[in-house]
Amino acid sequence: MRKQQWMCLLLFLLATSCRDSKYMEGVTPSTPTDVVDGNSSEDVKGFYLLNEGNMGSNKASIDYFDYASGIYHKNIYAERNPHVVKELGDVGNDIQIYGNRLYAVINCSNILEVMDVETVKHIDVVSIPNCRYITFKDEYAYVSSYAGPVQIDPNARLGYVAKVDTATLKVVDECIVGYQPEEMLVVDHKLYVANSGGYRAPNYDKTVSVIDLHTFKEIKKIEVAVNLHRLELDRYGNIWVSSRGDYYDVPSKIFVIDSKTDQVTEEFDLANSNMTISGDSIYVYSTEWNHSTAENTTSYAIINTKSKAIVDRNFIKDGTEKEIKIPYGVAVNPKTKEIFVTDAKNYVTPGKLHCYSTNGVRKWSVTTGDIPAHLVFTTKKIKPIN
């Protein structure tokens, strides 16, 4: 009798090891929410939002907003990939679209997840340790990697950038850069990489690495400031760089590098947790933590990239910024110019996404996955599940 019971249990476990969305209670279907009237004439068909999920919880997820229907779909990856074990993985750190593919960098799972942009169906994964951000040039993807394990270590190794062939989805080369490299961007034949040195605190890195894409070799380092993170390129060839400071005595700031000379030309006493460019405007929010005061200071600013002047100290005009506990992501629709701000709340429960009009008045809000962070717009409408 005991043998029969074990056999039944084994058969049950085998039957449930492959996640079938039709039969498995463990699979969470996407949750649709009507948030606004649909508009089928939008050039931008929708956007994907990557939720990081708390580290160690294996809860990275992807949401999708459809402009035609006005419906927000929460957690679509699991529904569309019922046989992918552990779903998307642990800590989603970046999401981008290139060609017909959707790429998600899953930091603590050490993978680059590659999907079809119209179906979100899994295509393949590329193994890259402690991967952080992704950018593209011609037939290659470039992924920054901390290289070593996730841990504070004064002797943490140098990071690198992995060069991935987008046709074969194989790593074809690596270029050593600074310590704990973060965001990257391409200007002509040069790849710029922000080095943080975050694992080596308080001995942070202070440099932006410059890689020649013809040789895929680091050709110089530009000294900027401690603990670099974000990079944005404006239409005048200037690279905007964020420094997170040391969280004690050195404040977060913004710097500007002229990509023609690779020299730092400007410095702004404006804290920067994240930023995005739309036209001649950089939208910057900051949640600056100070260990000395044990408090966050939050701000929402706009910088004009042509005049290099701070033109607005709070782009949210209706007072609803008071409802945002921890701003964690910012994006601007390239066509409608709507502003999107995410709220991570307490980092362990579902967050919020807020949509604002161009004049800073909130239009709608919706509940997201845990730690909503990275948003990418798509001109291709998502296809229904077969």
Image (tube, rainbow, N blue to C red):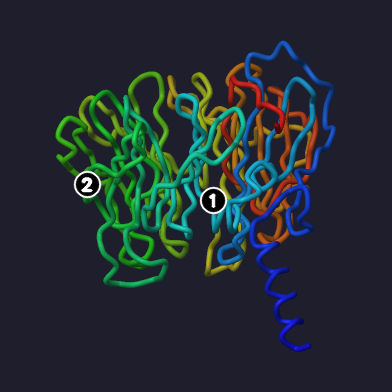
Circle 2 sits in a helix, a strand or a loop, which is it? Answer: strand
* Residue 365 percent location from the top left of the image: 79, 38
Which quadrant: the C terminus? top right
Is disc 2 surrounded by few (<14), some (14 to 19) or many (20+) residues within 10 Å? some
Viewer-nearest residue: 36 or 314:
36
In which quadrant will I find the N terminus? Answer: bottom right
Instruction: Indicate which disc residue 175 carries.
Output: 2
Residue 321, quarter of picture: top right
21 or 250: nearer the eye?
A: 21
Q: Position of residue 107 (x, y in %)?
A: 47, 55
Does residue 69 sit above or below 2 in this rendering? above
Q: How many marks?
A: 2
Name above or below for residue 124 compared with residue 111: above
Q: Which of 254/63 is in front?
A: 63
From the viewer's perspective, tell me whether residue 320 is left or right of residue 46: right
Q: Earlier in the sequence, mark 1 or mark 2?
A: 1
Residue at 43% x, 63% y: name it.
249
Amino acid type at circle 2 is Cys
Q: Is residue 137 left or right of residue 89?
A: left
Q: Which mark is residue 157?
A: none
Residue lying at 59% horizontally and 20% vertically, measured from the top left: 379
Would you say 117 lies left or right of 319 here?
A: left
Nearest to the observer: residue 385 or residue 309 = 385
Residue at 34% x, 51% y: name it: 181
Amino acid on which the number 1 mark rests in the picture: Gly
CA separation in Å, label 1 and label 2: 23 Å
Label 1 SS? strand
Residue beneath the point at 75% across and 75% down: 8
Residue 62 visible in the displayed image:
no
Q: Is residue 54 visible?
A: yes
Residue lying at the far bottom in this picture: please name it. 2
Q: Which residue is mark 1?
A: 92
